[in-house]
Image: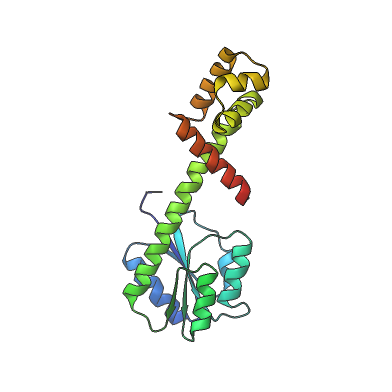
Amino acid sequence: MTRDQSIVFIVDDDVYVREAIEDLFRSVGHDVQAFGTTDAFLQAPRVDLPGCLILDVRLPNTSGLEFQREQAESGFHLPTVFITGHGDIPMSVAAMKAGAIEFLTKPFRDQDLLDAVHRGIALDRRRRTELAILAGMKERYASLTSREREIMDLVVAGQINKQIAGELGLSEMTVKVHRAQVMRKMNAKSLPELVRIADHLSSATTRA
């Protein structure tokens, strides 16, 4: 996978609209997967690339808005651009509140759709980068011993070596050795950087 690769998913029950959008995005270099129903989209093998979903509002069985809500509740994070031939303001507001990045009423300009999807792909690429960074932090934190984790917690809470030694019943030299190990394992070059790492880990745990 190269850095610039991306994929566009299309879910629209109108085959002519689906094919026209597919041709548009292939013409500018994107991989594309197009489906007539949300069920077909969910059942298809998913290519692991930064991407964006173009979703018709009116679909058989499940509406695009219902599908968006269901997927958001299940942890689905693919940026979504809604398209519709029957849009109205309340519908567009509901879609945007639920996390859609754009709501376009047919007929729309090709450039408007391209711009919206490119914004979605950029968001997904950034999300993936942030997840990879967080995964690295979690892996490094998992490599700490229980004592090192204790010391890291106290260090980021602002305690100095002497205070940590007193609280844990250790010598200051032992605390210094453990602290150095924490900095090395967590790949932190400074105390502020270690604090930022701890904040990221804490925030991720809270969100989970």
Q: Is residue 31 something one can see in this rendering?
A: no
Task: State the residue at coordinates (64%, 15%).
Answer: 170
Q: Nearer the viewer, residue 204 or 69?
A: 204
Residue name at image x 37 percent, y 62 percent: 30
Q: Is residue 39 above or below residue 160?
A: below
- Is 147 rendered above or below residue 140? above
Q: Quadrant of residue 39?
A: bottom right
Q: Relative to 109, say whether 204 is above or below.
A: above
**Point 49% across, 69% down: residue:** 100
Q: How is the image coloured?
A: rainbow
Residue 25, percent across and down?
Answer: 36, 68
Q: Position of residue 8 (x, y in %)?
A: 43, 64
For residue 189, above or below residue 24? above
Camera-side residue of 72 and 46 = 72
User: Going by the image, does 7 lie left or right of 161?
Assistant: left
**Looking at the picture, how far across and down is residue 75, in whole percent?**
60, 58
Q: Is residue 154 visible?
A: yes
